[in-house]
């Protein structure tokens, strides 16, 4: 297989949230796609945030495109000059008021939708989180913080109470990491 060739690119609009670009592409077989739309976004970060008493920090908020309220893990986009780790710690503090003195554990880095988007999501596990301050929300944000026992999350996913895909995948990656840690620590004894 060969990569496509970009013949022409133009922006339909640019915003602080993201850009919409229209490309004209030539495929290896010579076919031309006149209007291939690409959404350019900064990378996103999210985290399963676990308190000392094994509860997961969730945020619930209205999502206009989904026309409903969604239970999600803390997440957001990277600011200019920020590392992924700095970004998730900032988002966690701003959205929830929680922090941790434990270094975030990177669980994975994934393309959101490489068919139409340029960004990745970097997923972390944050342990030993605690409430440090009040939320620092933007004027467009209304977020309710919910603490849910780690042991209830899988059932809530199965019952469709948690339906945001990035939250679901992060939970299973964190569960896998935590199970491996328990097995490894018991093998060392």
Image: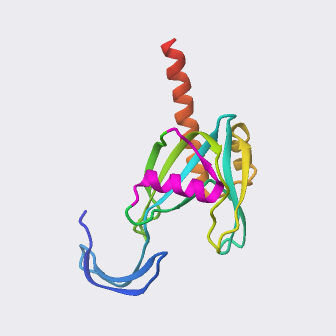
- Which quarter of the image is occupied by the N terminus? bottom left
In front here: 84 or 135? Answer: 135
Check the image and tell me how it is coloured.
Answer: rainbow
Which residue is more in the foreground, 138 or 55?
138
Give the magenta part as a residue range: 82-102
Query: Left of 159 or right of it: where is 31?
Result: left
**Is 112 placed left or right of 65 in the picture?**
left
Residue 47 left/right relative to 139 = left
Could you tell me if residue 166 is visible in this image? no
Residue displayed at 56% across by 30% down: 179
View extreme (top): residue = 189
The residue under the point 52% across, 56% down is 90
> Residue at image x 44%, y 65%?
79
Looking at the magenta stretch, what is its main secondary structure?
helix
Q: Looking at this view, is 121 or 30 the one in front?
A: 121
Query: Residue 72: x and y, percent?
Result: 65, 56
Q: Is residue 28 above or below residue 172?
A: below
Splitting the image into 4 quarters, where does residue 31 fall?
bottom left
Q: Position of residue 25 (x, y in %)?
A: 29, 80
Q: Is residue 86 magenta?
A: yes
Residue at 76% across, 50% down = 159
């Amino acid at each position: 297989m060969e990569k496509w060739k970009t013949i022409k690119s133009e922006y339909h609009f640019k915003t602080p949230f993201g850009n919409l670009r229209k490309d004209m592409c030539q495929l290896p077989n010579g076919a031309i796609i006149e209007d291939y739309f690409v959404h350019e976004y900064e990378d996103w970060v999210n985290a399963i945030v676990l308190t000392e008493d094994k509860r997961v920090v969730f945020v619930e908020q209205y999502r206009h495109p989904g026309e409903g309220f969604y239970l999600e893990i803390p997440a957001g986009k990277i600011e200019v000059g920020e590392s992924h780790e700095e970004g998730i710690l900032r988002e966690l503090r701003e959205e929830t008021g929680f922090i941790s003195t434990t270094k975030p554990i990177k669980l994975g880095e994934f393309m959101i939708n490489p068919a139409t988007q340029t960004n990745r999501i970097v997923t972390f596990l944050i342990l030993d989180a605690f409430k440090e301050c009040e939320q620092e929300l933007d004027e467009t944000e209304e977020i309710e913080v919910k603490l849910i026992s780690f042991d209830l999350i899988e059932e809530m996913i199965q019952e469709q109470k948690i339906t945001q895909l990035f939250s679901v995948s992060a939970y299973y990656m964190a569960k896998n990491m935590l199970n491996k840690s328990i097995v490894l620590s018991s093998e060392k004894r």
